[in-house]
Image (cartoon, rainbow, N blue to C red):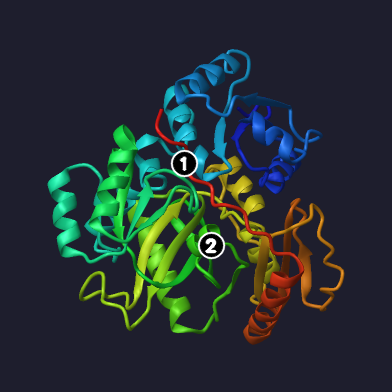
Amino acid sequence: MADRPLNILALACFNTGDRFIERCKERGARVWLLTKETYLQKKPWRRDLLEDIFAERDDTPLQKTIDTVSYLARSIRFDRIIPFDDVEVDAAAHLREHLRVPGMGDTRARVFRDKLAMRVRAEEEGFPVPAYVGVLHYDDIRAFTERVPPPWMLKPRTEASSTGIRKIESSGELWAAIHQLGDRASHFLLEQYLPGDVHHVDSIVTEGKVVFTEVHRNGVPPFDVSHAGGVFSTYTVERTSADWQQLAALNEQILTRFGLLRGTAHLEFIKRRSSEPSASSGSAYGDFYFLEAGARVGGAHVADVVEAATGVNLWSEWADIEIDKGTVPYVLPPRREQYAGLIQCLARTEHPDLSRYDDGEVVYRVPDPYHAGLVVRSPGHARVRELLDAYARRFADDFLAVLPHYELPPQR
């Protein structure tokens, strides 16, 4: 490989990885993009930085994707295959296995994609998780519903974000939902509904060691925003707090046990409200429970929040780690330790006017069409919270649009 540029295939639905592509170009690597037809039109890609763009139909099966990339590999020797989105982690792992490209393969990728696999592995390693059962053996499901009171969450095992999740209030509603799923039911899990505050931890990992961590708390849980509408927010947790220390330690242990060798990670946790019954007893992690793990950069402009607070861009650092692949020691760039927060909602107009949000702490304006969003930064945690609270009320009046939640299509 020393006598030619490194060739990287990026798999992406959403156009979030421009900084990754930019860093690759700076380092002399060449990047090709494989995306879906729908997403090709939604946002302009950096064609000036890409060798080429290939688009598949939205419903292309995995085997067809493997065939397509194998055909491309006749003339392009791909050295890295990188998924920019959660939904591409499986495809990237299968392609690496098929083409014998280095990186995370099928088995290891499973715990960063399949929510049931995550739960089983976390529980085996002694990490606290909400009570759960796979929608597989009916006697196990009945035993779960007798042991764990409703409501429950019926979750797709491999969908991203809150897509396809249903809150179930009774056994009758549950069995109706399972029968409606038909053959797809085995691709779901049932989980105890655990009210609380959702947190996420974003990391950089090199050679199996977590070298960078940022801890955040969401305002309203993403499930509530996606299903009921509203304004989403997330912000840096106080760096000296017990929550930061506890989540940073838990995050590092999970990533180590799950076997992430290098790259970036986005893990989600929920802090159980103390008035709620415990989902597991005797936890060494207080009220925190593990929800899910992603071997990628967090979505919803999380990377912009991290960069605002620390000066570190997760996409750029991920590119460096993938290019070097452990051949040279990774050096984390200098970082600041300030506080940042994001506020965002669906907007009624394609390009909402954010000019009246002119506080000096505003450092980034979300450019996505039909979205209103800002990132703020301050040396003080309280100031970030103050701004987000005030902006949430104003966003609701100025911009907020509520659309029906996307549901998975019925079985055909």
Judge the density around disc 1: few (<14), some (14-19), many (≥20) Cα neighbours within 10 Å. few
Near-viewer residue (230 or 68): 230
Which residue is pictured at 41% across the width and 45% down the height? 113
Task: Write down the residue under mark 2.
Answer: 228
In the drawing, does residue 25 fall left or right of residue 271?
A: right
Give the class, few, some or many, for how many residues have Cα within 10 Å of label 2's Cα (few <14, many ≥20). Answer: few
Label 2 residue SS = helix
User: Relative to 80, is 283 on the left or the right?
Assistant: left
- Residue 335 lies in quadrant: bottom right
Residue found 74% across the figure and 65% down from its top: 399
Say which mark, if any, is on residue 81. none
For residue 389, above or below residue 105: below
Looking at the rendered structure, the kind of residue marked 1 is Leu
Q: Residue 339: x percent and y percent?
A: 65, 76
User: Which residue position is annotated with label 1?
Assistant: 408
Residue 182 falls in image quadrant? top left
Tell me, yes or no, if residue 94 can be seen here. Answer: yes
Task: Name the residue rendered at 60%, 27% in the picture.
Answer: 1
Image coords of residue 76 (percent x, y): 62, 19
Q: Is residue 38 above or below residue 355?
A: above
The extreme right residue here reads 355
